[in-house]
Image: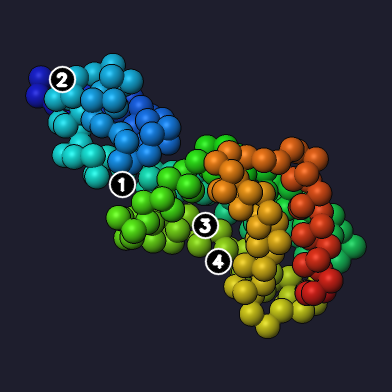
C-alpha cells in the first residue's frame, strides 16, 4: 500500500496499471513498451507505477501470470462430459466448439504471441504460464478421457496423449494462421467446422 493512501484507492491504481500494461504490452511488445507508456494509459505517475512494480520485468510477469486465473472456466468445461454412449459425439461437439471459441479469442491469441515472442528472454515465465494454464486443461481433459475409457466409451492407452491429439485437431489451423498472420484469420463458421471435423477425427481414432 502506498503511504497515506487508503487501501481501496491503492488497489484501484494497481488494477489500472495492470490493465494498462496488458494493453500496451500487447500493442507494442515487451521491448517497445516503456513504463512511461503504461503510466500515461493508467492515468498515474511513473513514480506510482514503480511503487507498485519494481521494474518492467516484474510488471510483465504479473500481467502474464494473472491470465492463468481465467483457465478455471476451461477446466470446468472439459471436466463435465457425461459418460453417455448415445450422446458422446454430441457432447464432445458442444465442448469442442466452446473450447475452440475460448482459445481463439483475439486477446488470448495476442497474449500467446507475446509470450512466445519473449520466451528466449523469459523462459521460466513462459514455462510457468503454460504449466499453470493450458497444461492444467490438458491434464483435466486427460482425466475426463480416462473416465470415459473406464466406462467403455473410448479406447485409450495414453489419456494425456489423447488430450493433446484432441486439442491439436481443433487448434492447429486457426492458431497457426493467427500466429503467422498477426491476427485471427477465421470466421465463426470456420471455427465450428474445425471443431466438428476434429471431433469426428478424434472419435475415428479413439472410439
Residue at the spot of label 1: 61
Residue at the spot of label 2: 5
Q: CA distance from mark 3 to mark 1?
A: 17 Å
Instruction: Please name the residue shown 62% across and 67% down the image.
Output: 164
Instruction: Please name the residue shown 83% across and 62% down the image.
Output: 200
Residue at the spot of label 4: 139
First of labels 2, 4 by sequence position = 2
SS type, badge 3: helix
Q: Nearer the viewer, residue 96 or 150?
A: 96
SS type, badge 1: helix
Residue at the spot of label 3: 134
First of labels 3, 1 by sequence position = 1
Judge from the rendering whether residue 73 lies leftward or rightward of residue 64; answer left or right. right
SS type, badge 4: helix
Asked whether the viewer can see residue 6, the reply is no
The picture places residue 168, in percent across and down from the top left corner, at 65, 62
Mark in the foreground, 2 or 3: 3
The picture places residue 95, in percent across and down from the top left corner, at 72, 52
The picture places residue 3, in percent across and down from the top left corner, at 9, 24
Q: CA distance from mark 2 to mark 3?
A: 38 Å
Q: Quadrant of the N terminus?
A: top left
Q: CA distance from mark 1 to mark 4?
A: 24 Å
Residue contact between numbered discs 2 and 3, judged by CB atoms under 8 Å: no
Amino acid at each position: 500500500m502506498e503511504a497515506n493512501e487508503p487501501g481501496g484507492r491503492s488497489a484501484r491504481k494497481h488494477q489500472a496499471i495492470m490493465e494498462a500494461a496488458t494493453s500496451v504490452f500487447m500493442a507494442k511488445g515487451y521491448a517497445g513498451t516503456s513504463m512511461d507508456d503504461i503510466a500515461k494509459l493508467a492515468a498515474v505517475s511513473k513514480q506510482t507505477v514503480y511503487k507498485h512494480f519494481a521494474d518492467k520485468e516484474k510488471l510483465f510477469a504479473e500481467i502474464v501470470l494473472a491470465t492463468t486465473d481465467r483457465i478455471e472456466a476451461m477446466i470446468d468445461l472439459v471436466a463435465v462430459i457425461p459418460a453417455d454412449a448415445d450422446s458422446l459425439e454430441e457432447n464432445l461437439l458442444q465442448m469442442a466448439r466452446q473450447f475452440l471459441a475460448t482459445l481463439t479469442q483475439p486477446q488470448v491469441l495476442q497474449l500467446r504471441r507475446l509470450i512466445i515472442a519473449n520466451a528466449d528472454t523469459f523462459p521460466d515465465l513462459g514455462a510457468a504460464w503454460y504449466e499453470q494454464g493450458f497444461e492444467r486443461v490438458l491434464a483435466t481433459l486427460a482425466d475426463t478421457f480416462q473416465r470415459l475409457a473406464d466406462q467403455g466409451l473410448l479406447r485409450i492407452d495414453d489419456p494425456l496423449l489423447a488430450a493433446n491429439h484432441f486439442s491439436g485437431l481443433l487448434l492447429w489451423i486457426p492458431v497457426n494462421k493467427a500466429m503467422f498472420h498477426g491476427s485471427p484469420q477465421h470466421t465463426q463458421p470456420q471455427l465450428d467446422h474445425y471443431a466438428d471435423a476434429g471431433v469426428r477425427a478424434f472419435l475415428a481414432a479413439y472410439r
